[in-house]
Image (cartoon, rainbow, N blue to C red):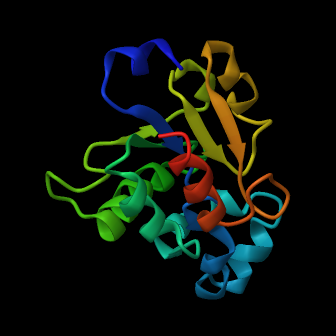
């Protein structure tokens, strides 16, 4: 258990956005093919792309189910070369979880390229070896690898795993 959790009532869970909460490829059909080709190597640099994405299956329900049990934050990385992504990520959270006080993710979005600087009990991430996630354990936290390549392929699996550890 992290130092922070020992003084609070709930354990802390951080959730990544891209390909964890958000289905990144779901935006592609809504993007001009010329832009997709221009940014073929870095699709996350397409202006406005983050506003076009849909939630991952079960993600919205999972956050609502876990919120009463954990202190939940979104911990995501936004592309440095795409300033619209920073804005669009806030708007996405507000769209799917509400912009009002009392929502499960109200003022709980952290954008960082250094996830290891955050202290908590769990980090749910599809890229457990990138952007500091690989160092999250240094302060006692556990990375939960999400997605088809991870240890937990679905949100139902993540909810079951975390609920046992609440």
Horizontal and vertical percent position of residue 29: 65, 87
Horizontal and vertical percent position of residue 83: 49, 48
Residue 13 in the image: above or below residue 66: above
Q: Residue at x 68, y 14 (%)?
A: 138
Horizontal and vertical percent position of residue 160: 59, 57
Instruction: Pick whichever, 98 or 33, lies toward us.
Output: 98
Instruction: Pick whichever, 78 or 97, lies toward us.
Output: 97
Q: Is residue 93 visible?
A: yes
Q: Residue at x 75, y 63 (%)?
A: 153
Q: Is residue 114 visible?
A: no
Which residue occupies the extreme front position in the image? 164
Instruction: Pick whichever, 132 or 62, lies toward us.
Output: 62
Drawn side of residue 45 relative to residue 67, left or right? right
Q: Residue at x 51, y 17 (%)?
A: 2
Q: Quadrant of the N terminus?
A: top right
Residue 54 in the image: above or below residue 132: below
Residue 149 in the image: above or below residue 86: below
Count of numbered circles on the image: 0
Which residue occupies the extreme left position in the image? 101
Drawn side of residue 119 relative to residue 31, left or right? left
Find residue 12 and report its image quarter. top left
Horizontal and vertical percent position of residue 95: 32, 69
Residue 111 in the image: above or below residue 154: above
Drawn side of residue 36 relative to residue 9, left or right? right
Drawn side of residue 43 relative to residue 27, left or right? right
């Amino acid at each position: 258990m992290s130092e922070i959790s020992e003084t609070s009532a709930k354990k802390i869970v951080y959730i990544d956005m891209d390909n964890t909460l958000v289905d990144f490829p779901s935006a592609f059909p809504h993007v001009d093919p010329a832009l997709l080709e221009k940014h073929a190597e870095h699709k996350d640099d397409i202006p406005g792309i983050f506003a076009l994405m849909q939630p991952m299956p079960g993600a919205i329900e999972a956050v609502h189910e876990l919120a009463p049990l954990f202190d939940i934050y979104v911990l995501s990385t936004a592309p440095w070369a795409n300033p619209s992504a920073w804005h669009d990520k806030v708007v996405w959270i507000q769209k799917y979880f509400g912009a009002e006080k009392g929502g499960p993710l109200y003022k709980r979005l952290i954008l960082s390229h250094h996830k290891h600087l955050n202290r908590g009990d769990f980090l749910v991430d599809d890229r457990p070896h990138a952007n500091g996630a690989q160092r999250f354990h240094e302060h006692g936290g556990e990375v939960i690898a999400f997605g088809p390549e991870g240890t937990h392929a679905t949100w139902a699996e993540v909810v079951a795993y975390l609920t046992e550890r609440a």
